[in-house]
Amino acid sequence: MAMSKKLYNLMDWAEIEAVTYSEEDHPKGVLGAHPVRGGQTLVTTYRPDAKKVELKFKGDRKSTEMELADEEGYFAALVKNREPFEYSFIITDEKGDTHEEYDPYSFAGVITKRDIQKFSAGIHYKSYDLLGAKIMELSGVSGVHFAVWAPAAIRVSVVGDFNNWDGRVHQMERLWDSGVFELFIPRVKKGDRYKYEIKMKNGICILKNDPCAFEREEEEDGASIVKGLHEFLFTDDEWIEKRDKNKISDIPVSICEIEVKDLLDKSVNIKKLAQKICDIAVSDGYTHVLLSDVIDDRDPLFCPSLSLLSCDGLMSLINEIHKKEIGVFLNWNTVKFPDNASGLSLFDGSCLYEDGDEKRSFYPGGGYRYFNTGRNEVRNMLIANALYLILVFHADGLKVNDVARLLYLDYDKAPGQWTPNMYGGNENLDAIDYFRHLNSVIKKLSEGIMMVADDESVYPDITKDTEDDGIGFSMKINNGWFSDVSGYLSYEPLSRSAHYNEVCFPMVYQYNERFLLPLSKSKAFAGRKTLFEMMSGDDDEKFSNLRALYSFFMFHPGKKLIYPGLCLPDKTDERFNLCLRDLLSLYRNEKALYGSDDDPTCFEWINNISANENILVFARYSKDKKDLLICVVNFLSIPRKEYKIGVPREGKYTEIFNSDAEKYGGFGFVNPKSITSKKDECDMREDSLRVRVAPMSVTLFKLS
């Protein structure tokens, strides 16, 4: 069909060329419907996959064939103005197949200038609702709104099954000078696969997965999948309301670390999976579970582990666990991302998510890049990702991995592999500011949500409030405690005296931070023996050591994190399991064990100088000082029949726990009756008790 001269003269051929060469970042300026002189409207579309395109007005039965303005597939029609101006295209492809669709370029933008300003400033905390693929309805038409941040791109297109992966068809609109591109595409639906085709400044096109996709194919280079976000209906309002009223320091926190992959059956039945998890947590008496493998740093930011659970699956799982009044923690990566071709690395041809300084973005060991937390938009994405897990998935806490790697510019790097900060130091000032920002946002959301730093460094004030220039985490994992105490117990009992200070030392710094004590699947012990196998002696001695370790752990100040798989090779010793259940029950019910972890006046050493005997004695008080517990620890394999200990208060003391009880597999060297203190000086105290102390044991007494 020959194009009319009038139509020819109305065409902006420079812009048309930009569209046909796929270099247009403002396609709405030339495609769609635009008023022209003479009271008419020019309607244009670029469909290189079409043989014929017809224009159809809403309510009309007939359609008008559009003229082929450019043989590359640029179609145009000149029509009289009419209100309202709603239309669709009837497209016939080269095979002769015909379908009708609305013009993507006829819909108004969704993202506002205010949205862009907040995102650019790093304060659009729900950017997961701003960017990505969102199923929605505009002007009564169903489709998907796509948005992506790619400021260095010449052009960005949405490609997928719905356009034969042709980057020329759905070129996106750049919003002002923000670097955010958007486009609403009718007919696209839930389950459709897609990617972004990005044309870099060197003219080369690359395919990238959506950083804000909620679902993705499992293959490393698999496509993103359109997924509705707010479809699952939670029924845990009562739990959330109760959680948000809690003050972390006042509640017991005993977290069971669980690897979901070990519990999954082939059918991935969520209710059965939730029941298995709840059976473990409820029967043993944990207050929370840590689902350690459902968020994977090898997967996209907003997807659960691709090989385990879908978004809906994880939401349903957390909802079911909350019904049993058990809190849920998730492992969370905010440090690094995979250095692969379809991911965040060089996303728009520039260092967007990573630092432009190779030494800053370099991750030792390879395969990853560090996030550039000095860039507002990157911070925004990471904070939004944390809020996404909390608000959308209803997580009660996040265990933030590898914090030290981001805090220090030289972490695990050789000289010459890192760039100092502006003052010549090794602290990552951007990361410090980012963590403060992150934690202040979450604290304002709810003080009942726990942010746990897995930090192996000695960086100060990790858990100090941001208002007081701290980093603001709720708790820090005390990896040093785990290393010192488990290392101490791996020695033969008679050799432990030389290492006595190691088991006492953690109390020197206990109140520098709010600590979470771990008996967990630590990196330091990955691939090594279980704790049972690390202990010295025969099996009976190993069990005594193990019971003593877990008892000392439970009575020591600090919240608790336990990985059951670290304990025994086969997890089948019911006597030890009973001991652990009783310890968890004691911890949960005794305020002196959980309600005063951050108060140094609620802990008192009674005896920490008996290195030759390997005995420790300490007191734990409740915050109001009404409750008093005395813990006696014997890490030597020698029993003491009438061991004298000083006590802070006179009165009657009752043994409420003994790790040597017969029911736990011990020898039953216990204190069956209450013991009344006497005026008999010991340990620099006027009153004292004489108690039975079993070998390799921990005993807990309570003042009546």
Image (cartoon, rainbow, N blue to C red):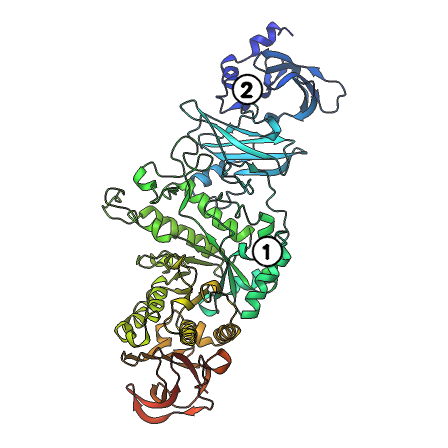
Residue most toward the right? 61
Tell me where residue 105 appears, x and y as whole percent. Answer: 59, 25
**Residue 600 sits above or below residue 126 on the image:** below
Residue at 57 percent of width and 56 percent of height: 318
Tag 2 residue: 30
Q: Which mark identifies residue 527?
A: none
Does dot 2 land on a helix, a strand or a loop?
Answer: loop
Does dot 1 land on a helix, a strand or a loop?
Answer: helix
Tell me where residue 684 appears, x and y as whole percent. Answer: 28, 86
> Does residue 415 appear in the picture of this structure?
yes
Residue most toward the bottom? 679
User: How many neighbours does mark 2 have within 10 angstroms: few (below 14), some (14-19), or many (20 or more)?
Assistant: many
Placement of the N terminus among the 4 image quadrants: top right
Q: Alpha-carbon distance for marks 1 and 2?
A: 48 Å
Residue most toward the front? 538
Which is nearer the N-term, disc 1 or disc 2? 2
Depth order, front residue of 450/577: 577
Q: Looking at the image, do the residues carrying marks 1 and 2 touch, with CB atoms under 8 Å apart?
A: no
The mark closer to the camera, 1 or 2, is: 1
Tag 1 residue: 317
**Residue 381 sits above or below residue 109 on the image:** below
Depth order, front residue of 289/547: 547
Residue at 49 percent of width and 25 percent of height: 25
44 relative to 498 in the view: left or right: right
Tell me where residue 545 appears, x and y as whole percent. Answer: 40, 74
Amino acid marked by disc 2: Val
